[in-house]
Structures are given as structure tokens and as C-alpha cells.
Image (cartoon, grey):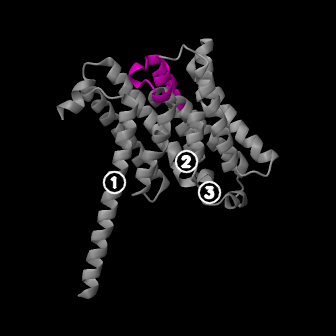
């Protein structure tokens, strides 16, 4: 137990990392719930990679990374919307096309510059241990905004998850709320990439929400359990990275995926035991 507490007692950078990680975990849990319910994992992955060229460009220009991430995410969402409205292609096709294009553009920008030797790892895998107080304040504001909007729109978002036509019949503009959901996913990705990087932010969005979906039957409970699972994974991942000199972002996401499989095994075992008891009672 000492190994899980000691790293955070006398290390301000570990304390800031823990706060930043928990904020991202809460934000990703709320948005990730709808990502899992609506089957939007592909767009989440695409957005996570779509910020790469924006971040690379702003680093070359000496601008804040969040600006580049925001521009990249906006280009991704805008491109998907434009293609689906102006052509007969499906949303998955548009997402796949822009996913490949944005990722390729990011690779080209990085390959043309010799200044990314020390920064590429930070772009891809984050730098949660380097989070400052200004970063924390921005993440906290974004977290409050994302959670507030998600909770305010929980009914239309849930209806969209079940059937877009039903949402329209109930008086909600399905297209508007779909765009708003994509915007919330984009904001979450932009605010999370500094913590876990462009390659791992997808895990933050999906793993805790998928874990909660195994045991929760109500949206509110699913959000709460996802936030708890995500926050616990941040704590355990940071402690493991401190003790064994591991990449912090990778350790956090690895713990999250590990928690999912532990819960999955427990649910499967419980179902098997329940089926066994039912068979025994039936035979009696």
C-alpha cells in the first residue's frame, strides 16, 4: 500500500499529474459513455490521430500545442460533416478517409523536420508528468464544460444512441445533437492529448466506459463507474510508472485495459455460477 501512496506525498509533479489524470478520466468517462453506447469508437480513434498534423505544425511555428490540436480536431469533424453531406458516402467511409489523410499529413510534417527528435514521443504518448498549474486550470475548465453540456443533453444523446428517428419524433434535432456530440469528443481529445498523447487518448475514451458497460444498466451509473474506473487507473498507472520507471501515459491506459478484462472475467464467472445454481435448482 505504501508504494501506491508514497509517490504522491512529496512530489509536486506527481500530484499535478494525478489531478490532471483524474480530470481527464472524468471528462473521458462522461463522453466515452456515449462513444460506447453509439458505437462511435472509430470517430474517437480518428480524432485522436487527427490532431497529429495540427500539433506538429504549431510546434514548428512555436505556437501552443492546444491550438494545433484544436485546429486538427476541427478539421477532422468539419471534413467528415462536409463529405457526408455533399456525397453519398457513409460516415464510416468519410472518417476512414480523413483518418488516413490526417495521419499521413502528420507523418509528412514530422518527417520534413529535424526538430522533433525530443518532441515526437511527447506528442504520441503525452507528458502527464510535465503538466503545470496553467495546464491544470485549462483542463479543469474544459472538464466542467464537457460534463455540464453532456449532462444537459443526456436525453437527446441517449435517444440518438437508441434510434435517431426516435430523437427526431421526440422533437430533438438529431443532426444538431450529433454534431454537438462530435464536438464534445473533439474537446475531450484536445484536452487529453497532453496527458496521454495522441496514440493513447483513444484508450481513455473507450476502456473505462466499456468496463462500466459490463455491469451498469443506467446511463448515470455507467458514467459514474467509468469515472471511478478511469480515476483508479490513473492512480495505479502513475504509481507503477514511478516505481518501475515506465511511461506514465502508457501505464495508465494499460491499467485501464487490464481493469476491463478483470471485470469481464468476474462478470463471466458470476454468470456461470448463476447458471450452475439455476440448473441445480431445476434438477431438484
| Residue 266 among those drawn in magenta | no
Q: Nearer the viewer, residue 265 or 172?
A: 265
Where does label 1 land, which residue? 263
Q: Residue lying at the far bottom in this picture: please name it.
A: 284
Residue sitting at x 46%, y 16%: 118
- Left or right: 55 with respect to 28? right
Q: Mark 1 or mark 3, which has the lower sequence index?
A: 3
Residue 159 marker: 3
Q: Are marks 2 and 1 in contact (CB under 8 Å)?
A: no
Residue sitting at x 46%, y 39%: 204
State how far apart marks 2 and 3 are (Cα): 18 Å
Element at badge 2?
Answer: helix
Residue sitting at x 50%, y 22%: 120
Element at badge 1?
Answer: helix
Q: Quadrant of the C terminus?
A: bottom left
- From which residue to which does the magenta span run? 118-142
Of circles 2 and 3, the one toward us is: 2
Amino acid at each position: 500500500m505504501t508504494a501506491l501512496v508514497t509517490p504522491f506525498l512529496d512530489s509536486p509533479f506527481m500530484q499535478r499529474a494525478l489531478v490532471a489524470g483524474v480530470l481527464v478520466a472524468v471528462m473521458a468517462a462522461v463522453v466515452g459513455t456515449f462513444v460506447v453506447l453509439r458505437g462511435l469508437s472509430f470517430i474517437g480513434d480518428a480524432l485522436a490521430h487527427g490532431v497529429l498534423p495540427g500539433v506538429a505544425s504549431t510546434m514548428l511555428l512555436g505556437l501552443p500545442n492546444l491550438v494545433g490540436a484544436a485546429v486538427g480536431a476541427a478539421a477532422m469533424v468539419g471534413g467528415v460533416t462536409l463529405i457526408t453531406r455533399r456525397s453519398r458516402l457513409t460516415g464510416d467511409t468519410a472518417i476512414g478517409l480523413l483518418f488516413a489523410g490526417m495521419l499521413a499529413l502528420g507523418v509528412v510534417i514530422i518527417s520534413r523536420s529535424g526538430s522533433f527528435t525530443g518532441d515526437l514521443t511527447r506528442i504520441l504518448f503525452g507528458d502527464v508528468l510535465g503538466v503545470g498549474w496553467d495546464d491544470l486550470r485549462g483542463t479543469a475548465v474544459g472538464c466542467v464544460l464537457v460534463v455540464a453540456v453532456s449532462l444537459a443533453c443526456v436525453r437527446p444523446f441517449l435517444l440518438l444512441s437508441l434510434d435517431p428517428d426516435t430523437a427526431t419524433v421526440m422533437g430533438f434535432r438529431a443532426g444538431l445533437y450529433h454534431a454537438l456530440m462530435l464536438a464534445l469528443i473533439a474537446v475531450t481529445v484536445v484536452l487529453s492529448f497532453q496527458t496521454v498523447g495522441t496514440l493513447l487518448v483513444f484508450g481513455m475514451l473507450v476502456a473505462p466506459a466499456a468496463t462500466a458497460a459490463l455491469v451498469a444498466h443506467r446511463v448515470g451509473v455507467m458514467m459514474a463507474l467509468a469515472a471511478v474506473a478511469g480515476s483508479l487507473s490513473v492512480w495505479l498507472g502513475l504509481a507503477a510508472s514511478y516505481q518501475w520507471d515506465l511511461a506514465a501515459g502508457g501505464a495508465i491506459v494499460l491499467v485501464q485495459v487490464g481493469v476491463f478484462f478483470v471485470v469481464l472475467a468476474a462478470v463471466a464467472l458470476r454468470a456461470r455460477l448463476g447458471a450452475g445454481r439455476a440448473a441445480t435448482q431445476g434438477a431438484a
